[in-house]
């Protein structure tokens, strides 16, 4: 009787696992290109991360500062040397900031991470391809 009960519980557990794995989040899946903690120096200096990506890829750039008073933002430099602010300073809230962008070029991209209060501090950086 115990063996039969164990088998029934095992089948139920596997069924629940299969259901859980088949559930999808409303947030698109993302493949991380960069996921690291950087230290942004005080006084308006930057920290940088470099990643390789392809034209047409949609990226989500997320910055989360160790302190909620900090205002992390970024400047993305494309392979040809041009660039723009992603995410922008004015979008920083409670130590967090994020933006989505579709890339226009293949190759090595550089994200300079800055901090709007000029206090500096630790920032968790995640750059992910949105699928």
Image (cartoon, helix red, strand yellow):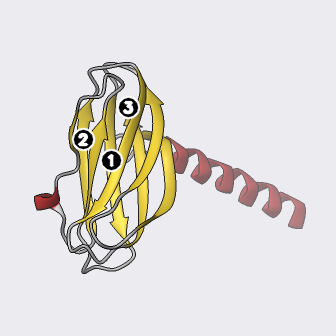
Left or right side of 54 for 82: left
Question: Regarding mark 3 in the picture, which secondary structure is present there?
Answer: loop
- Give the mark nearest the N terminus, 2 or 3: 2
Q: What numbered label is drawn on residue 100?
A: 2
Q: How many C-alpha atoms fall within 10 Å of the one at disc 3: few (<14), some, or many (≥20)?
A: few
Measured as percent of width and height from the top left, residue 108 is found at 44, 28
In depth, the one of 88 and 117 nearer the eye is 117
Residue occupying the far left of the picture: 90
Sequence-first disc among 3 and 1: 1
Relative horizontal placement of residue 129, taking residue 43 as reference (left or right): right
Count residues near mark 2 (Cα–Cα under 10 Å), then give few for <14, some for 14-19, many for 20+. Answer: some
Q: Which residue is mark 3?
A: 131
Tell me whether circle 2 and circle 1 mark residues in contact (CB < 8 Å): yes
The answer to whether residue 1 of the structure is visible from this angle is no
Q: Secondary structure at mark 2?
A: strand
Q: Quadrant of the N terminus?
A: bottom right
């Amino acid at each position: 009787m115990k063996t039969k009960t164990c088998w029934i519980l095992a089948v139920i557990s596997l069924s629940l696992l299969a259901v859980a794995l088949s559930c999808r989040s409303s947030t698109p899946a993302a493949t991380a290109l960069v996921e690291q903690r950087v230290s942004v120096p005080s006084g308006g200096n930057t920290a940088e991360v470099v990643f390789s990506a392809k034209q047409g890829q949609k990226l989500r750039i997320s910055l989360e500062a160790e302190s909620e008073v900090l205002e992390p933002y970024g400047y993305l430099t494309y392979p040809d040397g041009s660039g723009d602010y992603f995410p922008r300073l004015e979008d920083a809230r409670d130590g967090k900031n994020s933006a989505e962008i579709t890339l226009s070029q293949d190759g090595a991209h550089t994200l300079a991470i800055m901090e709007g209060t000029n206090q500096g501090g630790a920032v968790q950086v995640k750059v992910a391809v949105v699928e």
